[in-house]
Image (cartoon, rainbow, N blue to C red):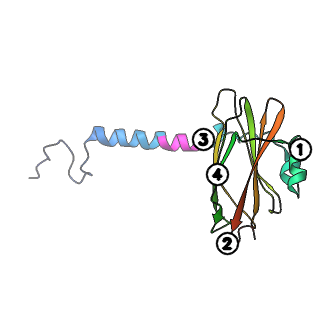
Amino acid sequence: MMSRPASGQAPGSTGLPDLARRAFARATLALAATMALRPAFAQPAPVPTDWNRPAFEAKTAAEAIRQLGSSAPATSRDIQIDIQDVVENGARARIEVHSRIPGTQALSILTDNNPQPLAATFTFAAGIDPYASTLLKIAESGPVRVIVQAGGRLYAATREVRVTLGGCG
């Protein structure tokens, strides 16, 4: 005579109580349904319409600055650029920028000697601390510029950076 397990399971069962098996089956079905419906609810990220394509496609720093809105931004000591003076690997140079100019709306980072100098533009909502940190590719030694847009004007700060190992190429 075969005895029935104490848990109330039939001989040869998986060892899980009926309620646990049912909960597992429901969770598995819910997960499968969620994964099947996910593409129906997924939306592609909107393409920003306010990005400045001509500035990013500019071949010289002067042309990129002109596309940003001015050919001669005012020099400002209120723009802090933190980057090493000597970058060992131009393919991966960390830069941190902070603007203390009131009303900063955007800041752009340019590397003059890159094939396309405009590397990044960050925009800020009112009341946000205008700070950015990113990695740059720097093709060769030369100036790294930060252009800040505030109050309808452009301001600039520059740091000379020497690259010991090539970056863009």
Q: Secondary structure at mark 1?
A: loop
Q: Nearer the viewer, mark 3 or mark 1?
A: 1
Q: Secondary structure at mark 4?
A: strand
Query: Alpha-carbon distance for marks 2 and 3?
Result: 48 Å
Query: Alpha-carbon distance for marks 3 and 1?
Result: 50 Å
- Reading the image, the residue beneath label 3 is 38
Look at label 2 and name its amino acid. Thr
Q: Which one is in front, 50 or 1?
A: 50
Crowd tier of the residue under label 1, counting other residues whose Cα lies within 10 Å: few below 14, some 14–19, many 20 or above:
few
Q: Nearer the viewer, mark 4 or mark 3?
A: 4
Query: Alpha-carbon distance for marks 4 and 3?
Result: 32 Å
Asked where in the image residue 102 lies, by quadrant, the reply is top right
| Residue 11 colored in magenta in the image | no
Crowd tier of the residue under label 2, counting other residues whose Cα lies within 10 Å: few below 14, some 14–19, many 20 or above:
few
Q: In the figure, is residue 30 to the left or right of 102? A: left
Q: Secondary structure at mark 3?
A: helix
Is disc 4 in contact with disc 3, using a CB cutoff of under 8 Å?
A: no
Look at label 1 and name its amino acid. Ala
- Reading the image, the residue beneath label 4 is 134
Residue 9, percent from left and from top: 21, 45
Residue at the spot 21% in from the left edge and 47% down from the top edge = 10
